Image: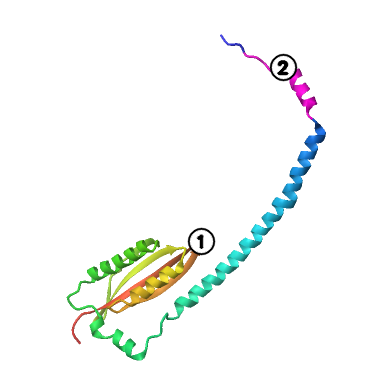
Amino acid sequence: MRTLTIPNLSKLKDSYKSIDRKKLGIYIIVILSILRFVIYPMKEEVKKDKEKLNSKLQEYMEDIKLYTSKKIKQPSQSVSNNQISIENLYGENAKSKDIQISLAKIVKKYAKQNNINLQSIEMPKPSKTKYIEQIDIKVRLSTNDPYKVFSLFQYLEAMPKYTVIKETQINTFGGNVNFDFTVSTYKLLRKI
């Protein structure tokens, strides 16, 4: 059977008396002065740096919105006429779902190669007119480097078949920039 020993209270009182209160007071004053004159000013600097970072991020986002609102390259008149010709539209025999799947694969491959977080791809029902069918895919991406997404825009718009980036929305969340956009291409339904 074990016996429980109670610490001797007189020894605790003796150890408390043996603590040098002057040294303890000096140590406390040194620690408090370090906190006051070193740590506290650093906290203020961090707060100022956060404010600067937020203001720079706002300016950066405004620049991105301005950049996406303008065309990256202004094509010459002859090139623009050539881009929207019948030869640059998908043919009558192409299936809309296959076109959407191929565009989605291109976006997925590009996102994987450039470390872009692909959040979702939606394939809405194509809209038809008398001669042309508009085929869309809606893409949601997230990245730390928005210029990679702009190069994706350029890549998609430079495809052999006429492709346009529309309805672009840009939002920031933390350090990430979120892009919601629609990739549109067109299919000829019947010969004109």
Seen in the picture, residue 4 relative to 20 is either above or below; the reply is above
The N terminus - image quarter: top right
**The quarter of the displayed image where residue 85 is located:** bottom left
Seen in the picture, residue 185 relative to 45 is either above or below; the reply is below
Residue topped by disc 2? 8
Q: Would residue 6 be counted in the magenta stretch?
A: yes
Q: Position of residue 96 (x, y in %)?
A: 23, 71
**The quarter of the displayed image where residue 179 is located:** bottom left
> Which residue is outermost to the right?
22
Seen in the picture, residue 45 relative to 135 is either above or below; the reply is above
Q: Residue shown at 67%/59% (left/top)?
A: 45
> Which residue is outermost to the left?
93
Q: Residue shown at 44%/63% (left/top)?
A: 143
- Is the residue marked by circle 2 packed among few (<14), some (14-19), or many (20+) residues within 10 Å? few
Q: Would residue 68 be counted in the magenta stretch?
A: no
Q: Position of residue 187 (x, y in %)?
A: 24, 78
Question: Could one spot residue 130 in this view of the protein?
Answer: no
Which segment is the magenta one?
A: 4-19
Q: Residue shown at 43%/63% (left/top)?
A: 142
Asked if residue 89 lies left or right of residue 49, the reply is left
Q: Residue shown at 53%/71% (left/top)?
A: 60
Residue topped by disc 1? 175
Q: Position of residue 53 (x, y in %)?
A: 59, 64
Q: Main secondary structure of the magenta part?
A: helix
First along the sequence among labels 1 and 2: 2
Seen in the picture, residue 105 relative to 30 is either above or below; the reply is below
**The quarter of the displayed image where residue 79 is located:** bottom left
What's the amino acid at mark 2?
Answer: Asn
Which mark, by number, is residue 81? Answer: none
Asked if residue 114 lies left or right of residue 133, the reply is right
Front residue of 155 and 127 = 155
Helix, strand or loop at mark 2: loop
